[in-house]
Image: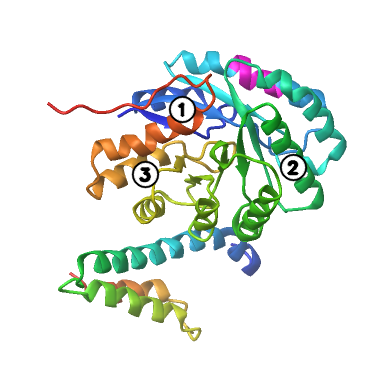
């Protein structure tokens, strides 16, 4: 089965992960800009990072027959540094023009501070001005519900197109708010701290799937790129057809990301003899 | 050996995950009952899980042998 990893931090992962993903049917990964595990001090460090994910990383993925796309943003944790954020924002449009760059992300909230909210607004404004897709991170664990509500409040006060906005890391307590507001919702499957493959399938069975995306977890912390395949196996084990799985794990990413013409992977239909 | 604080800090998130999985299983069961219009003919596994959770919720465990008690409890289920 052909699979798309919509949210994958490749720079934190090994070539072996690419190889195994390729062997398991992954045809494309999308790499949002994220927190490196420490706060960067210089805008130039971000610029080099954006170059890495927009220029170098696609060559690494290509060795394994995987397409690589990226997003650029100052992540919410480092958005607390206003001066740095503003400097990086000034230089971001250059990267939005890169052939594999799909939009602005991941912006969003971590602790929902005033500085984070201002940065979120600035990122969304830039995205709308440049007709870009937006990927919005919502907080972890105990901050999730409050942060997700705040993201929705911020967006409701802006002139945005919900079709172009993906709010990520939803779980049982936040998914309804996101879908009811008309946005795309992403589930992120972590070994411990976020949604699990089984719970994700519960959600897929409970809600309309047209605006749902499913990500594995792939970063420098405890994470596992193959939670996505685990989720597919769980979905199929419960009796869902291959085409239903293709719709969720391949075609939905194509439909959302395909709003950017740089994304040229089309939805597929499995034919039966 | 870990201190009491280290014990909680080290294992809280994993326990949280595992409890969420149990909650999701119970929700999944309710959904299936609602979808199909009837309970499982034999609900002894469900009852066993509920009894196990009651056992865990009891704060009075002088012997710190909850795992042993649960194994004995679950051994009754075929």
Q: What whole-number distance in Å separates the C-alpha atoms at marks 1 and 2?
A: 35 Å
For the residue pair A220 and B3, the one nearer the viewer reads as: A220
Q: Is A109 or B23 nearer to us in this picture?
A: A109
* Magenta-drawn stretch contains B77: no
Quadrant holding the N terminus of chain A = top left
- Mark before the other along the chain sequence, 1 or 3: 1
- Give the x, y percent position of residue B60: 49, 86
Q: CA distance from mark 3 to mark 2?
A: 33 Å
The chain carrying label 1 is A
Who comes first in sequence, dot 3 or dot 2? 2
Observer-side mark, 3 or 2, equals 2
Q: Residue at x 70, y 45 (%)?
A: A158
Residue A115 placed where, x, y %? 81, 47
Q: Residues within 10 Å of mark 2 (few under 14, many from 20)?
A: some
Above-or-below relation of A253 to A97: below
In magenta, the rendered stretch is: A49-56
Q: Please state which of the two labelled residues, at mark 1 or mark 2, is closer to the viewer.
A: 2
Q: What residue did someone put label 2 on?
A: A121
Return the residue at label 1: A17
Q: Considering only vertical position in the picture, is A54 above or below A197?
A: above
Residue A73 sits in which quadrant? top right
Q: Which mark is residue B57?
A: none
Residue at the spot of label 3: A231
Q: Quadrant of residue A92?
A: top right
């Amino acid at each position: 089965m052909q699979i798309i990893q919509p949210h994958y931090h490749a720079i934190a992962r090994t070539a072996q992960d690419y190889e195994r993903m390729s062997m398991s049917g992954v045809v494309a990964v999308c790499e949002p800009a994220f927190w490196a595990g420490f706060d960067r001090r210089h805008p130039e460090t971000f610029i080099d990072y954006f170059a890495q994910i927009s220029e170098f990383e696609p060559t690494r993925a290509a060795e394994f027959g995987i397409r690589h796309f990226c997003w650029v943003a100052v992540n919410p944790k480092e958005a607390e540094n206003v001066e740095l954020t503003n400097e990086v924002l000034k230089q971001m449009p250059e990267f939005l023009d890169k052939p594999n760059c799909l939009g602005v992300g991941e912006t969003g909230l971590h602790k929902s501070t005033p500085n984070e909210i201002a940065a979120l607004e600035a990122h969304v404004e830039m995205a709308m001005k440049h007709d870009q897709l937006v990927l919005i991170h919502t907080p972890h664990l105990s901050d999730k519900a409050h942060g997700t509500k705040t993201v929705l409040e911020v967006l409701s006060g802006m002139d945005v197109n919900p079709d172009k906005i993906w709010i990520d890391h939803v779980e049982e307590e936040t998914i309804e708010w996101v879908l009811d507001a008309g946005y795309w919702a992403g589930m992120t499957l972590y070994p411990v701290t976020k949604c699990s493959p089984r719970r994700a399938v519960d959600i897929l069975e409970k809600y309309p799937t047209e605006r749902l995306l499913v990500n594995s977890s792939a970063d420098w912390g405890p994470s596992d790129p193959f939670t996505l395949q685990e989720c597919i196996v769980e979905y199929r084990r419960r009796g869902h057809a291959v085409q239903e799985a293709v719709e969720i794990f391949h075609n939905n990413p194509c439909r959302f990301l395909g709003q950017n013409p740089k994304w040229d992977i089309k939805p597929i239909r499995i034919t039966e003899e | 050996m870990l201190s009491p604080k280290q014990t909680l800090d080290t294992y809280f998130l994993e326990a949280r995950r595992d409890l969420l999985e149990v909650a999701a299983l119970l929700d999944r069961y309710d959904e299936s009952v609602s979808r199909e219009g009837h309970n499982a003919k034999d609900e002894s596994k469900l009852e066993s899980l509920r009894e196990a959770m009651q056992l865990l919720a009891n704060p009075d465990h002088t012997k710190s042998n909850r795992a042993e008690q649960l194994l004995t409890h679950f051994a009754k289920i075929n």
